[in-house]
Image: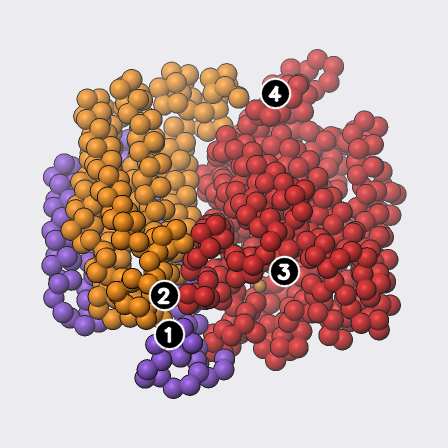
Chain colours: A orange, B red, C purple
Amino acid sequence: MADALTTTTAHTDLEVAAATNLRHHFATPQQQFDSAMLGMWTFLITEVLFFGGMFTSYVVYRSIYPEAFASTSQYMNVALGGTNTAVLICSSLSMAMAVRSAQLSKYRAVVISLILTMIFGTTFLVIKYFEYHDKWVEGLVPGLKFDVAHYHAPQWAHQAQILFFLYFAMTGMHALHMIVGLGLLTYLLVMAVRRRFNSAYYTPVEMIGLYWHFVDIVWIFLFPLLYLIGDRG
Amino acid sequence: MATLAQIHGTPEAGEEVNYLNVEHGWKSWLFTTDHKRIAVLYIISITLMFFVGGAMAVLFRIHLLSPEGLFPPEIYNRLFSMHGIVMVFFFLVPSIPATLANFLIPIMIGAKDLAFPRINLLSWYIYIVGALFTLYAVIRGGVDTGWTFYAPYSSTYSNSYVLAAAFGIFIAGFSSILTGLNFIVTVHKMRAPGMTWSRLPLFVWSNYATGLIQVLGTPVIAITLLLLAFERIARVGIFDPNIGGDPILFQHLFWFYSHPAVYIMILPGMGVISEIVSCFSHKRVFGYNFVAFSSMAIAVLSFVVWGHHMFVTGESMYASITFSVLSMMVAVPSAIKVFNWTATMYKGSVSFDTPMLYAFGFIGLFTIGGLTGLYLATLATDIATHGTYFVVAHFHYVMVGGMVMAFMGGLHFWWPKITGRMYSEPWSKFSALLVFAGFNLTFFPQFILGYLGMPRRYATYPPEFQVLNVLSTAGASILGLGYVIPMIYFFHSLKYGPKAGPNPWEAKGLEWTTQSPPTTFNFDVTPVVMEEAYNYGPVEEIVG
Amino acid sequence: MTSTHVPTVRILVTIWAVLVVLTWTTVTVSHIELGPWNVVVALVIAVIKASCVGWIFMGVRFTSPLTKLFVVAGLVWLTIMILITTSDYATRRWDYHAQPWANTKDNGPATAP
Ligand SMILES: [Cu+2]
């Protein structure tokens, strides 16, 4: 790997470069920060379209099979889904606090905010696990365990599988993003404990914060679409 | 160039230090973050994949010599499917962006590297992993679904290695996304002082537009293939007609990426042609702004035309009409480019070096490929030509006659910059002519075959089509020779080619102001740009 | 990076409170029968919530016009995909309910595409 410290341009002081982790090919820390942020936003656009494929499928099947869709709604646990929504909102707040604390070089506050965010994130996944477990017990997992014969609305048992498939695909992909996010937060936590983030350099906190909020936004749409608007055609 | 404040700070011990000789050993390559070295890694990898895909083409062209065919139909199905998959996802999509653009964009805009050098290296590794999955599928016996993986055949019925190939494409998609993301950020944030948007070389413009498509389109093919894979594993899913799923939804999602993807496979080539035509006409590109914005227009329009692949699937006729009209609109920015290249040559001092020969080939063949696209965008004619060899000929005129020509042209144009050496002039001209002749002999008969009604993807055909098929196979062997000869003289040039010097073509552009090959950080001092792109001396201004 | 905006605790907590209240609202409204308006209300609230998260938590408000353009472009492309795809389904001539696997009680015979 080319070492960032072997070559610094004439404009950049070596110490500034070290404090801001400036890499050799950037002229200024500002340029590096702006590039990282634009890159992160571009990445989030790809995420929007990645989830977009599933949202498109959802819209198509919901519109052509409204009755089958309604028949699935009684299996959606609004209490758990609503709790999870609140949990994720809290995690977004603590993530935003982590970024703010890093911007102000408040080392302890960064660590505490990150730990809170991870606790909320884990809580979300635990609740999600129980929801999945219920679906498994009730035989509502298409392909693996779907009880067509005992589905309460037999005439919609087939199409309901499509909608349960979408439920698992969308929430599962969301949960996978949460798990990745928790991994990234662990990395941030280690770095924060080592006091690596301060007002001069907090790019990773800000970037992973954007990712975390994006995952929150996905859930903000999944919750009403999957849990709330089901039983009305 | 007078516009550059250049201070020479390289240590001169016998030979000048450049990105190739600065470090040695395989580690210096596999762990490099230098965009130029990564470009070289990509050139080697995609060339290998090109010959893998080409080998299958050779095999099924031999198969098609006789009406009953040489191989059993199952083998034939796998050959053409794997040819398409390897060529599209592992050659054409990365061809120019990951190689020439990777090498040139930072130099052309006066930067030391791309914005994210480590992500650039990561994208190469991701590409290799994806390629290995796909090669695994090839070795185990291949895929017989066609490169389009249409459900429910691919999800439920096919007994071939769909998962491995689809997973390979899924992985390689992220390589493409990261390349596009890197270009977008680089063009926005890494331009040298004075390098305004209106001074960007058109090659940078076209690759920026390509980057947008890669970023906006590729995630959709990723999720689509993922859903397909779930469906294949779990044997139930959203495209499964047995439970009311709609296979056409798969096509919608697939073509939402794969139509724009054909512009990933042509826009960078158009950028190359703009550079070459300007250099060898010794003239500023006619209507710079129009050419630049036509790239952006193509990128945007490409996302609203995908339904033209689905006219005969049962898509709504209202949707078909809309898609048909929108598809024809793509002809406008494409034609702007062709007309402006032609106008650039008009009254220029045109020279016929090898890159220019490829550019001529591109312009003619792309025009044929583009105009036959209009036939296919027309609802009534598409009913007759859909799924025939007419379609095959059409997209090969664009993909091979366009993109591969441009790739070869670009490689010949920048080879002295990449390697510091010149290649054999007569041999390169000879092989350029071979490629042109071989290409037309291969694919023009396929227009006629399609017009006569020969369907694509069939292992056998009626005896009356044999003459044209034999012509096509004959052309393919000439085309193959045209691709092998450059391999020989390029390798030869590495050791025996005369030194090129910084600017063998007397071209304009920042990349020609550095030494050949450039140093690791491209410029000793960040250049300051004071002039327009393609500022070729006094030009007779053509008003029009 | 001195140019970066640091949000106040006050605004962050306010946004959090708004999000919690909107979550409660959307759950409550979903229990009231509003016909097709249930979907509209749920989606409008979701859009408001997402905008709050994006605008303040993600700091779109304080970013450059370029970043704003990128965000808008991402959403426009998502809209293109959903709108054009569904427009096909909305204008097809045959009726899905007439397919053999479905309940065909009040639909006419299937018309060929
Ligand atoms: Cu197309």
Per the image, the residue denoted by label 2 is A159
Q: Position of residue B283 (x, y in %)?
A: 69, 51
- Tell me whether the residue at label 1 lies in contact with that at label 2, contact meaning CB atoms closer than 8 angstroms: yes
Per the image, the residue denoted by label 3 is B337
- Circles 2 and 3 on the same chain: no
Q: Which amino acid, mark 3?
A: Lys
Between B517 and C31, the one nearer to me in the picture: C31
Cα separation, mark 2 vs mark 4, equals 54 Å
Residue at image position (18%, 48%) is: A80
Per the image, the residue denoted by label 1 is C102
Residue at image position (42%, 48%) is: A46
Q: Nearer the viewer, mark 1 or mark 3?
A: 1
Q: Nearer the viewer, mark 2 or mark 4?
A: 2
Q: Nearer the viewer, mark 1 or mark 4?
A: 1
Which class describes the residues within 10 Å of circle 2: few (<14), some (14-19), or many (20+)?
A: many
Q: Position of residue A125 (x, y in %)?
A: 26, 40
